[in-house]
Amino acid sequence: MFVLANFLFGLAKVLDLALNIYFWLILARAVLSWVNPDPYNPIVRFLYRSTDPVLYWIRRRVPVVFGGIDFSPLLVILGIYFLRLFLVRSIVDLAVRLR
């Protein structure tokens, strides 16, 4: 059972790292929305391509624009925080119990 426990622990760590990286991408995208970035910059294009699917999905389902302010990045950040608290910790706890 220790092999499954190690696998689950590794999975939880990789998932936590991926969620952390996506958090920073969303945060960078939100900060870039305050300025007028060059749309042809490769970094800006990467940020838009990597965050647009999730932000677009949120914008389609929830009316998150109030007074010209887009709150979809905030909802995504809250979702990431929830996943890190609930899903990652649950997988780690399961891995600890299997040892």
Image (cartoon, rainbow, N blue to C red):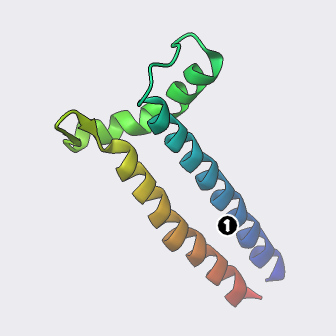
Q: Left or right: 30 with respect to 46?
A: left
Instruction: Return the residue found at the far top.
Output: 40
Q: In this view, does 44 lie above or below 38?
A: below
The answer to which of 25 and 11 lies nearer the viewer is: 25
Residue type beneath disc 1: Ala
Q: Is residue 64 above or below residue 83?
A: above
**Identity of the residue drawn at 63% across and 23% down:** 43
**Identity of the residue drawn at 67% across and 66% down:** 12
Q: Left or right: 74 with respect to 92?
A: left
For disc 1, the marked residue is 12
Q: Where is residue 74 in the image (x, y as percent from the top left)?
A: 37, 50
Indicate the quadrant containing the N terminus: top left, top right, bottom left or bottom right.
bottom right
The answer to which of 26 and 58 lies nearer the viewer is: 26
**Identity of the residue drawn at 56% across and 77% down:** 90
Indicate the quadrant containing the C terminus: top left, top right, bottom left or bottom right.
bottom right
Residue 62 is drawn in which quadrant? top left
Mark count: 1
The local crowd at label 1, few if under 14, some if 14 to 19, many if 20 or more residues have their Cα within 10 Å, is many
The answer to which of 46 and 36 lies nearer the viewer is: 36
Residue 91 is drawn in which quadrant? bottom right
Q: Position of residue 9 (x, y in %)?
A: 73, 72
The answer to which of 92 and 36 lies nearer the viewer is: 36
**Identity of the residue drawn at 48% across and 30% down:** 32
Q: Is residue 42 above or below residue 8?
A: above
Q: Is residue 9 above or below residue 61?
A: below
Secondary-structure class at tag 1: helix
Q: Left or right: 67 with respect to 98?
A: left
Instruction: Return the residue found at the far right.
Output: 3
Q: Left or right: 14 with respect to 20?
A: right
